[in-house]
Amino acid sequence: MAEFLAPLRGLFEYVNELPTSIQIRESQYFSPYLTVSHVVVMAIVAGLVLMMDLRLMGLANMRTPFTELQRRLFPWQMFGMTLAGITGLTLTYSDPMRFYINIFFWMKMLMLVLAALNAMAFHYTTYYSVASWDSSQAPPLGAKLSGAISVVLWTMIILAGRLIPYNWFA
Amino acid sequence: MLEPFFRWLGDFEASKVIGESLWIYPTIQAFHLVFLAILAGALLIVDLRLLGKGMIRQSVEQVARDAMPWLLIGLVGMVTTGVPQLMSNWSRQYHSEFFWQKMYFLTAALIFTFTVRHFMTRQHTVGGTTAGQKIAGLVSIFLWGGVVVSGRLIGLFT
């Protein structure tokens, strides 16, 4: 694995030896049910994020003002994100070395960071002028771009996440 | 009873190509989840509205009509990426109790979505929703949740 991850290796190895990590790893049902829960909450988070992205791109929910959609969906997105974080972190905690050597895992982490940066960039630029395009049928280029980048990133997050079990490049 | 049909699906040249390739099956599986997210978004935005949550300033009907194209895109994508998995891996699916559980949930969810739930979203409700609409939202979440949970369990237990 790439050298810049090397400093993390110690942490992953440390967690790998913790009794609770071993317990979850060796339990027959805990991991599968965590995986199932992670997929369910993924559908909630990604689904509601995509609905917002499509609105930004001018492709869906066009009769709802953007701020209304954003304000009403945000709590549910955060609710899902919290559960996705808890289930995802527990999965990583239960078998850290499996994820440490997995290229898809690190791709997914990178895409998650980029998705957060994209959301922040949108918030501090195009969102300032939202009053002028809130109900417009043709959102400005900046909004369309943020939405499209988010769709691509979330698609890659889902694809990379599902491909983790197939570690083709190990 | 349906085994000959499953066997017939598996006998296609395409089924064998998918099964023998190292990457086609996983890729189809991964895109199945992307379409799941689209479908889930289009369902949830309406189910939340039926529950009297989410975008309550818009009428239930408007939210549902706007979400419908994406619900259909999600469904078509799910079937398009689901059938090849069945073709190349029919034996495992056929013998998996979770596969059948998923099919029962799916049948119920589809019927419910295009009958009762559809009717409940055609009532001109602005603001709060009726008890019937709330129940429809809950039933929809339960049935589609059942599809997702049993679908993911197929790959984890046989």
Image: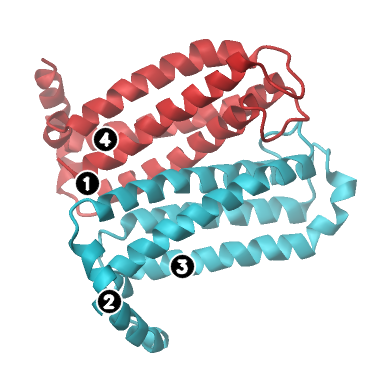
Chain colours: A cyan, B red
Tag 1: amino acid: Leu
Dot 4 falls on a residue whose secondary structure is helix
Q: Which of the chains bears the disc numbered 2? A: A
> Marks 3 and 4: in contact by CB < 8 Å?
no
Q: Earlier in the sequence, mark 2 or mark 3?
A: 2
User: Distance between the Cα atoms at labels 2 and 3?
Assistant: 23 Å
In this picture, residue A12 sits left or right of residue B144: left
Are tags 4 and 3 found on a single chain? Answer: no
User: Distance between the Cα atoms at labels 1 and 4?
Assistant: 19 Å
Q: Position of residue A74 (x, y in %)?
A: 66, 48
Q: Residue at x 26, y 27 (%)?
A: B101
User: Distance between the Cα atoms at labels 4 and 3?
Assistant: 29 Å
Residue assigned mark 4 = B84
Tag 2: amino acid: Leu
Q: Nearer the viewer, residue B52 or B92?
A: B52
Residue A153 numbered tag: none
Label 1 crowd (10 A; few <14 / some 14-19 / many >=20): some
Residue assigned mark 1 = B156
Based on the displayed image, in which of its 4 quarters is residue A71 positioned? top right
